């Protein structure tokens, strides 16, 4: 990275070849492949634009993964904004969430998708996306901490992504 900062643009190619696979695998665990490819490109574009900010006293890879994590957060923030604006200030509908998760997959029956979840995850996701509750309010309802409520919802969404992404439909 130090060579790249000093103007050796061939060093960028080495950085890309050396680290793009790991970054792509990280992103692919979070989003579908096509989106992961786009976020990978965005990550390296951001690396290029912010190369002067890199401090060589610190390891390169954590810095690169911070950039990719921020690109991922930006992607989810944009997706959430699109969902919010499409519902005209009404709560984010769970059907819209499932549509975003499913993306190019065939639609499934919503109740069948939610049935893959344990009761606590199902309740937390319904409260968050059907009733637009805050994480704090959800935590009070399911009698847990706000941090744990976020984890419960995150794990539930991951299960929904897996269920919707199965080829040949739901099990």
Image (tube, rainbow, N blue to C red):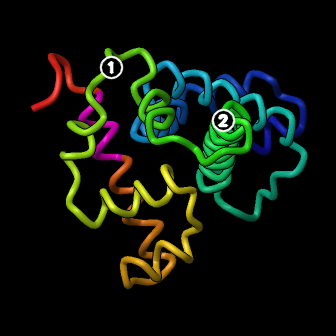
Q: Is residue 137 above or below residue 152?
A: below
Q: Residues within 10 Å of mark 2 (few under 14, many from 20)?
A: few
- Residue underneath mark 1: 107
Image: magenta residue range: 158-164
The mark nearer the N terminus, 1 or 2, is 2
Q: Is residue 163 magenta?
A: yes
User: For this rendering, which residue is in front, 151 or 3?
Assistant: 151
Q: Is residue 48 magenta?
A: no
Q: Residue furthest left?
A: 171
Q: Quadrant of residue 83?
A: top right
Please report the residue visible at 79 percent of the width from the left and 45 percent of the height from the top: 2
- Residue underneath mark 2: 87
**Which x, y percent locates residue 140?**
46, 82
**Which quarter shows the N terminus?**
top right
**Which quarter shows the C terminus?**
top left
Q: Quadrant of residue 46?
A: top right
Q: Is residue 64 left or right of residue 98?
A: right
Please report the residue visible at 89 percent of the width from the left and 31 percent of the height from the top: 7
């Amino acid at each position: 990275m130090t060579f790249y900062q000093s103007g050796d643009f061939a060093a960028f190619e080495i950085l890309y070849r050396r680290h793009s696979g790991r970054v792509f695998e990280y992103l692919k665990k979070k989003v579908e492949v096509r989106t992961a490819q786009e976020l990978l490109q965005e990550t390296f574009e951001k690396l290029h634009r912010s190369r002067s900010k890199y401090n060589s006293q610190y390891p390169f890879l954590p810095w690169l993964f911070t950039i990719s994590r921020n690109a991922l957060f930006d992607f989810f923030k944009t997706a959430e904004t699109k969902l919010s604006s499409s519902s005209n200030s009404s709560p984010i509908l769970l059907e819209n969430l499932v549509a975003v998760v499913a993306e190019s997959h065939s639609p499934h029956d919503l109740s069948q998708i939610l049935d893959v979840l344990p009761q606590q995850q199902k309740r937390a996701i319904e409260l968050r996306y059907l009733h637009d509750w805050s994480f704090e309010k959800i935590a009070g309802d399911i009698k847990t901490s706000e941090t744990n409520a976020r984890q419960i919802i995150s794990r539930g969404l991951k299960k929904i992504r897996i269920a919707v992404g199965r080829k040949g439909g739901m099990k």
